Image (tube, rainbow, N blue to C red):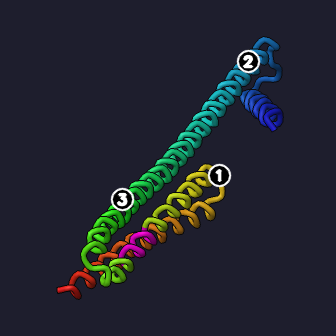
């Protein structure tokens, strides 16, 4: 393609010389003309290569920035999930320990009222179980996050979120059961 362009330029230059009334061309002048055309072609190729290199580097930089942004988003999601799981385990576990201490005292005083508190204890245990299962689900989502399987990542992430919501709900239910039991004693 470049050869045809060069030949056409040479042909156009010869036509222009003929129109100017010249009937012959010095070989040295023709060589100078061809050297100029070759220099222009080389400069054009360099410009084209520079443009392509710049374009490639720009696309690469944009893709790296997108990948870094996605990676940080996944990392932040996983870290937030871990914080929520730790909090859920702590509040449900702490509530279960408090209920156990209260049950120990209650059994020594009045063993007939233990069943109401046992329901609260059971809810707290379910809350700890949900938070612990959420930890495993969060691990699975972190494991899959580095692959191209985004659907599986989202699946495990949603399961983890639902389990944490279940854990907090269990804490609420346990608290409600304990509250109702305490109210019924008065």
Q: Is residue 129 left or right of residue 20?
A: left
Query: Is residue 123 located in the magenta-colored stretch of the structure?
Result: yes
Nearest to the observer: residue 126 or residue 153: 126
The residue tagged with tag 1: helix, strand or loop? Answer: loop
Please tell me in which quadrant of the rendered image residue 1 appears: top right
User: Is there CB contact under 8 Å for labels 2 and 1?
Assistant: no
- Can you tell which of label 2 and label 1 is closer to the viewer? 1
Q: Which mark is residue 90?
A: 3
Mark toward the start of the polypeptide (2 vs 1): 2
Distance from disc 2 to disc 3, alpha carbons, whole Å, reads 81 Å
User: Is most of the magenta stretch helix, strand or loop?
Assistant: helix
Q: Report the residue marked by disc 1.
A: 147
Give the label, 1 or 3, closer to the camera. 3
Where does the magenta region start and end? 120-127
For marks 1 and 3 on the same chain, the one whose residue lies earlier in the sequence? 3
User: Where's residue 142, x and y in %?
Assistant: 56, 53
Q: Nearer the viewer, mark 2 or mark 3?
A: 3
- Establish if 115 lies above or below 36: below
Q: Residue sitting at 43 percent across and 69 percent down?
A: 125
């Amino acid at each position: 393609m470049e050869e045809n362009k060069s030949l056409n330029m040479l042909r156009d230059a010869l036509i222009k010389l003929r129109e100017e009334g010249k009937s012959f061309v010095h070989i040295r002048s023709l060589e100078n003309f061809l050297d100029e055309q070759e220099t222009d072609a080389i400069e054009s190729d360099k410009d084209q290569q520079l443009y392509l290199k710049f374009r490639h580097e720009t696309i690469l930089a944009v893709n790296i920035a997108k990948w870094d942004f996605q990676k940080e988003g996944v990392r932040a999601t996983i870290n937030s999930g871990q914080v929520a799981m730790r909090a859920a385990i702590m509040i449900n576990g702490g509530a279960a320990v408090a209920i156990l201490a209260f049950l120990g005292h209650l059994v020594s005083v009045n063993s007939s009222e233990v069943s109401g508190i046992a329901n609260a204890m059971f809810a707290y245990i379910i809350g700890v179980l949900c938070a612990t299962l959420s930890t495993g689900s969060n691990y699975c989502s972190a494991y899959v996050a580095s692959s191209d399987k985004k659907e599986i990542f989202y699946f495990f992430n949603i399961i983890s979120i639902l389990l944490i919501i279940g854990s907090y709900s269990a804490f609420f239910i346990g608290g409600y059961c304990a509250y109702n039991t305490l109210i019924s004693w008065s």
